[in-house]
Image (cartoon, rainbow, N blue to C red):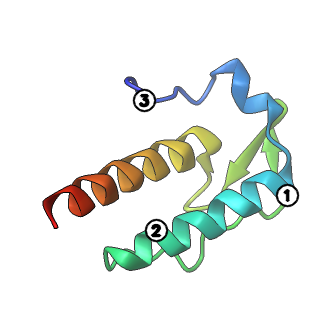
Amino acid sequence: MNEPLAPDDPRMRDYTAPQVATLLRELHEAGRRFGIQWGSATTHHSSVDGRVLVDFGTAPLATLLNLLHLLRSAEGARSWES
């Protein structure tokens, strides 16, 4: 992913609540390694216009995916330096 995902990206409609819950668990695990925690992030089973919302303060799924991409990139850079 070279460009951040937009909240209205049509691919966001393909994610189900269980898939987003799995991504949230990954975010918690990846963030913990960097001292970043989103303990209250959840889906609360809410959506807008067919898109699952992630509650960091009602962030769209694209925000979660973009954060995961940044953490994965940072982790890769960290392992490269070791």
Q: Amino acid at mark 2?
A: Ala
For residue 76, side relative to residue 54 (left or right): left
Q: Nearer the viewer, residue 45 or 81?
A: 81
Q: In the rendered structure, are the residues bearing label 1 and label 3 in contact, judged by CB atoms less than 8 Å apart? A: no
Residue type at numbered disc 3 = Pro
Q: Identify the disc placed on residue 30.
A: 2
- Tell which of 54 and 17 is nearer to you: 17
Q: Of label 2 and label 1, which has the lower sequence position?
A: 1
Residue at horizontal 63%, vertical 23%?
A: 8
SS class, disc 1 = helix
Eyeballing the image, is 28 above or below 75? below
N-terminal of the two: label 2 or label 3?
3
What residue is pinned by disc 3?
A: 4
Quadrant into which the C terminus falls: bottom left
Q: Say which quarter of the image contains residue 22.
A: bottom right
Residue beneath label 1, please?
18
- Give the x, y percent position of residue 76: 31, 54
Circle 2: element type: helix
- What is the CA distance from the residue labelled 1 to the residue labelled 3? 23 Å
x and y percentages locating residue 70 in the rendered image: 36, 48
What amino acid is found at the position of numbered circle 1 in the picture? Pro
- Asked if 23 appears above or below 48 in the picture, the reply is below
> From the viewer's perspective, is 71 left or right of 28?
left
Q: Residue at x 63, y 44 (%)?
A: 61
Q: Residue at x 64, y 63 (%)?
A: 24
